[in-house]
Image (cartoon, helix red, strand yellow):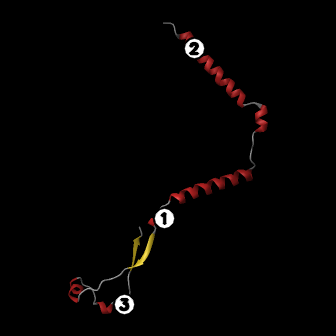
């Protein structure tokens, strides 16, 4: 089995094909047509790209899970229950407590 020269020829043909493709990319005629942005333009493109990323991220944000402050509604407790829990009697409480809850 002497496949050595045949495989070598196939490899050389592939390398020659790749080299020819790279040579076409480096064509001076194509280099003249290539667009090169100025420093200001590249900075503006970078800012626009960052803004687009931010918009996509905000679009994926689950805004329905944002925290909402609500006032807790207290049910009146009997004096015996208040005493058992060590609370002051209801008549002495004047402020309502704020509780952090999530909507959803």
In-image side of 94 versus 59 (left or right): left
| 6 up-or-down from 100: above or below | above
Q: Position of residue 28 (x, y in %)?
A: 78, 32
Q: Give how far across and how far down residue 99 sits, in percent.
A: 39, 76
Residue at image location 47% in from the left, 61% down from the top: 62
Q: Residue furthest top?
A: 1
What residue do we see at 33% from left, 83% from top? 74
Figure disc tally? 3
Distance between mark 1 and mark 2 Cα atoms: 62 Å
- Residue visible at 75% across and 49% down? 38
Quick check: marks 1 and 2 in contact, CB under 8 Å? no
Residue bearing the label numbered 1: 63
**Mark drawn on residue 55:** none
**Among the 4 quarters of the image, the one containing residue 82:** bottom left
Q: Residue at x 30, y 90 (%)?
A: 90
> What separation in Å lies between label 3 and label 2 (alpha carbons)?
93 Å
Q: Secondary structure at mark 1?
A: helix
User: Looking at the figure, which quarter contains the C terminus?
Assistant: bottom left
């Amino acid at each position: 089995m002497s496949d050595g020269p045949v495989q070598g020829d196939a490899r050389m043909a592939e390398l020659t094909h790749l080299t020819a493709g790279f040579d076409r990319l480096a064509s001076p005629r194509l280099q003249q047509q290539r667009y090169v942005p100025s420093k200001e333009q590249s900075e503006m493109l970078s800012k626009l790209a960052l803004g687009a990323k931010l918009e996509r991220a905000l679009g994926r944000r689950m805004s329905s899970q944002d925290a909402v402050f609500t006032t807790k509604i207290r049910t009146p407790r009997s004096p015996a229950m208040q005493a058992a829990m060590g609370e002051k009697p209801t008549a002495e409480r004047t402020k309502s407590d704020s509780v952090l809850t999530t909507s959803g």
